[in-house]
Image (spheres, helix red, strand yellow):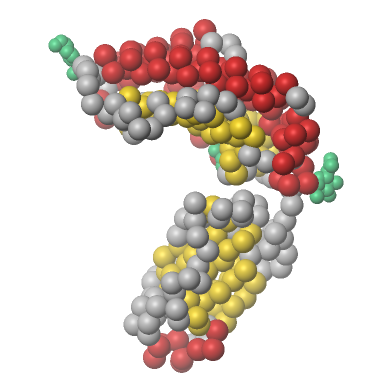
Amino acid sequence: MFLLLLFLLVLNINVSSGVNYSLETHYTVVTGIPSVPDFWAQTIIENVIIGYFDSKINQFESEQEWMKNLGENYVKDQTKNYQQFTEILKEILKIVKKKHNDTGGVHTLQQICSCSMDDETGIHFSPVGRSAYDGTDMILEMKNVGLVAAMEQAAVIKQKLDGAHDFCMYCHSLECDKWLQEYIYYGNSSLQRKVPPQVSLLQTDSSSPVVCHATGFYPDKVNISWQKDGQDLHEDVDVGETLPNHDGTFQKRAKLKVTADVWKKNQFTCVVEHKSGDPIHMILTEEKIRTNSAGTASSTS
Ligand SMILES: *[C@@H]1O[C@H](CO)[C@@H](O)[C@H](O)[C@H]1NC(C)=O
Ligand SMILES: *[C@@H]1O[C@H](CO)[C@@H](O)[C@H](O)[C@H]1NC(C)=O
Ligand SMILES: *[C@@H]1O[C@H](CO)[C@@H](O)[C@H](O)[C@H]1NC(C)=O
Ligand SMILES: *[C@@H]1O[C@H](CO)[C@@H](O)[C@H](O)[C@H]1NC(C)=O
């Protein structure tokens, strides 16, 4: 079953055409650290956290204004689901720990359920479930540790989740699709908004790389690159990960390693492409560089 899901995941990536909306729920259960909740979960759409639950607050919390429109039972139902799932995942962790002969100490089990749809074609992609024990993907484990043991673990989880109808809702195709559609419908104005990036060039001192920093944009998909005399530059360029800002927007940076000598003789341009508008071209000049790197970059969460 998990092998099958793996194939679907690979296929999905190849057939994407329009706007890909994804819904993910991340569940984490931890043993051995008294100061943190032993279970927490996040609901994430378009890489923005919309819901949170943990075993200390024992209550589902909506993180977005528009979720009020989901009805008065929404929070109550989610809370009930998560409370049940807490117990099931704790039990699964016990089983997996036993299989690893791990008795004491700190151990974690993570479960991610996700589904996605192409908004232009209306095609839904099959939901995908993934599990990791102590940070090791149980699917990837097949390669390293041996097929049989990994399959056994995956089967235990699958069985448990199949028994838990309420919980598996994000992994179960109809329910995940249903919620994804509901969220896109009710969250439309927020999820489909387009906020353009603010682009700036930063440098700590004259010998450090020039950082092209794009921030404040939504949605998270962005292309950021450096050009030398109009040609795409790959060498000496280091593009970072897209990171979330506290306000639901995103940031990303691309570092260019170049000496002042070289950039004064050639034209270097940072190009930022985002669907909020035309590509932004920022030509590297001395005046455009902001030198106090501390304080200019937005904080990340
Ligand atoms: C849609 O996006 C999600 C998360 O970014 C990804 O896991 C999934 O493979 C994508 N699906 C397609 C069809 O591109
Ligand atoms: C756990 O212990 C049993 C009995 O000592 C042994 O047969 C098994 O291989 C061990 N499993 C692992 C994952 O180390
Ligand atoms: C969703 O939001 C976009 C942009 O805010 C708007 O153009 C579109 O009409 C909305 N769609 C629906 C179904 O409300
Ligand atoms: C980023 O580049 C890829 C490949 O050229 C393109 O398909 C995609 O539309 C671009 N994304 C944005 C946000 O412009």
Asked whether, in this view, residue 232 is left or right of residue 69, the answer is: left
Q: How many numbered markers are drawn?
A: 0
* The image quarter in which residue 215 lies: bottom right
Question: Looking at the image, which is closer to me, 220 or 89?
Answer: 89
- Name the residue rendered at 60%, 17% in the picture: 80
Percent position (x, y) of residue 203?
A: 43, 78
Asked where in the image residue 155 lies, by quadrant, the reply is top left
Residue sitting at 75 percent across and 24 percent down?
72
The one of 289 and 158 positioned closer to us in this rendering: 289
Place residue 59 in its image quadrant.
top right
Report x, y in % for residue 295. 48, 71
- Residue furthest to the top: 163
165 to the left or right of 297 = right
Q: Judge whether 26 appears above or below 147 on screen.
A: below
Question: Is 42 left or right of 191, judged from the image as shown?
Answer: left
Q: Is residue 11 visible?
A: no
Work out whether 47 lies above or below 254: above
